[in-house]
């Protein structure tokens, strides 16, 4: 008989049955809502605490619901080890604080989520310097690297202008030069359904589970996925740090994550349709979407990605009308005439829209925003998986408001 190999969706849903270590025979994996676990003897407790035995002792350190989720993240990303945290920012903080020390340097892409940008800048207090470069061109990264550089931090596609960085080419160069510089990719926007950096020798993936991986806008979480060796290094410094996910959240995110392949297929499709709709709209000056052939790094995106996700950013020709446009959408959502919520975050099944300069990237100075390419009137739309004609209808009502058209 031909050996059958299970497909990615099946592997994600079923995980490895041998690892699901509970003997209750429940069909779905139960929530282990407990702070600590019983030892059968003092010796057993000692073995666990000394690391000789890998059993759960205390839920701040590990819990079966964490492992259930971590195993699936490894399956999705093609990693050997994963660690979940109570938010994406905790995952990034733990990663940086565990791998860097005073005197080290980081090279980061200049367009990043505002929280990550602020955290990297704050590391200067601990004498860890970050060089922000335009990593869309790998040569800029190579030029900024010196003997103190320990880590390259990329976010691709980036928040909010969807820059694409060629992590494959960047890591290849370091491998060829035999240089020990870790390449980290924040894979939140792409998700492992669209791109798997670890499979291209990238060292570490971080992601906010709050977005597509959970997918319903109702839980916050984050994760680091990497090799066993690197995780051991991270863990050595951070096992007592706190910031862990609670068991119930881990269970809810695990359940929601099981539908990610189908959700992402729909997000990718709606994202592309909406990007073209906006591109052809006379009121729109510029559209940012890696799936559009005129995106500056479209060819790199095609090489690295299977789909381009649901986030589309754009600028109106008349920047001053951005607020009117967004207010119309907000009031339509409240009255039931439209379906797009004026809200931060992204990657939810329902469509969300915001103005980054006035929300997610407000903490940057105006100069920093200009340097990152964030226009004051930039609008970021996270297309949901609703019927795409309804997303278009809702946007058209917004455009109607700035043209002085009628809104019924
Ligand atoms: C690309 C990216 N990385 C990390 C984060 C932080 O994740 P969290 O909000 O789960 O802490 C965000 C949040 O928006 C993000 O967009």
Image (cartoon, grey):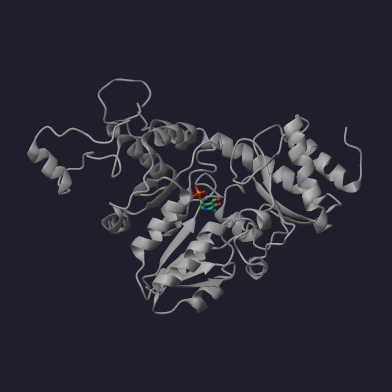
Estimate the x, y position of residue 231 in percent, counting from the top left: 32, 54
Residue found at x 39% / y 79%: 147
**Residue closest to the eye, 171 or 63:** 63
* Residue at the right extreme of this rendering: 405
Tell me where residue 185 appears, x and y as whole percent: 48, 58
Residue 6 seen in this snapshot: no
Residue at the image position 36 percent from the left and 33 percent from the top: 3
User: Is 2 placed left or right of 371 in the picture?
Assistant: left
Q: From the top left corner, tell me how far across and down residue 179 is, in percent.
A: 38, 73
Residue 162 visible from this viewpoint: yes
Q: Is residue 360 left or right of residue 207?
A: right
- Establish if 52 lies above or below 117: above
For the C terminus, give its image quadrant.
top right
> For residue 342, what is the image quadrant?
top right
Q: Position of residue 130 (x, y in %)?
A: 48, 71
Residue pictured at 36% horizontal, 67% vertical: 100
> Which corner quadrant of the image does residue 63 belong to?
top left
Drawn side of residue 288 relative to residue 166, left or right: right
Q: Is residue 363 above or below residue 396?
A: below
Task: Please give left or right for residue 245 compared with residue 372 in the image.
Answer: left
Work out which quarter of the rendered image holds the N terminus and state it: top left
Relative height, residue 26 to residue 52 (above, below): above
């Amino acid at each position: 008989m031909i050996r059958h190999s299970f497909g990615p969706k099946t592997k994600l849903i079923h995980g490895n049955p041998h690892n699901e270590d509970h003997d209750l025979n429940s069909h779905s994996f139960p929530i282990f809502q407990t702070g600590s676990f019983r030892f059968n003897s003092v010796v057993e407790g000692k073995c666990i605490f000394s690391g000789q035995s890998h059993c759960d002792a205390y839920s701040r350190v590990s819990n079966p619901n964490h492992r259930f989720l971590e195993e699936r993240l490894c399956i999705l990303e093609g990693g050997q080890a994963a660690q979940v945290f109570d938010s994406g920012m905790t995952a990034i903080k733990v990663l940086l604080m565990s791998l860097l020390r005073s005197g080290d340097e980081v090279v980061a892409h200049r367009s990043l989520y505002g929280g990550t940008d602020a955290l990297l800048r704050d590391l200067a207090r601990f004498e860890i310097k970050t060089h922000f470069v335009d990593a869309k061109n790998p040569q800029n990264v190579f030029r900024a690297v010196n003997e103190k550089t320990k880590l390259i931090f990329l976010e691709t596609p980036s928040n909010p202008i969807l820059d694409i960085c060629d992590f494959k080419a960047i890591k290849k160069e370091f491998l060829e030069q035999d240089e020990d510089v870790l390449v980290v990719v924040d894979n939140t926007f792409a998700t492992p359904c669209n791109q798997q950096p670890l499979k291209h020798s990238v060292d570490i993936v971080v992601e906010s589970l709050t977005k597509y991986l959970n997918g319903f806008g109702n839980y916050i979480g984050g994760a680091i996925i990497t090799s066993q060796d690197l995780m051991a290094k991270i863990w050595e410094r951070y096992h007592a740090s706190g910031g862990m996910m609670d068991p119930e959240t881990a269970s809810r995110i695990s359940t929601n994550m099981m539908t990610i392949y189908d959700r992402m297929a729909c997000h990718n499709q709606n994202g592309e349709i909406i990007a073209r709709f906006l591109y052809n709209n006379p009121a729109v000056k510029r559209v940012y979407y890696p799936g559009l052939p005129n995106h500056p790094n479209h060819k790199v995106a095609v090489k690295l990605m299977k789909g381009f996700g649901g986030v589309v950013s754009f600028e109106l020709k008349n920047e001053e009308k951005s607020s009117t446009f967004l207010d119309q959408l907000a009031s339509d959502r409240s009255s039931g005439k439209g379906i797009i919520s004026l809200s931060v975050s992204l990657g939810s099944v329902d469509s969300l829209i915001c103005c980054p300069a006035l929300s997610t990237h407000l903490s940057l100075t105006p100069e920093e925003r200009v340097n990152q390419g964030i226009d004051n009137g930039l609008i970021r739309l996270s297309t949901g998986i609703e019927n795409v004609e309804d997303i278009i209808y809702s946007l058209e009502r917004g455009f109607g408001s700035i043209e002085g058209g009628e809104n019924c």
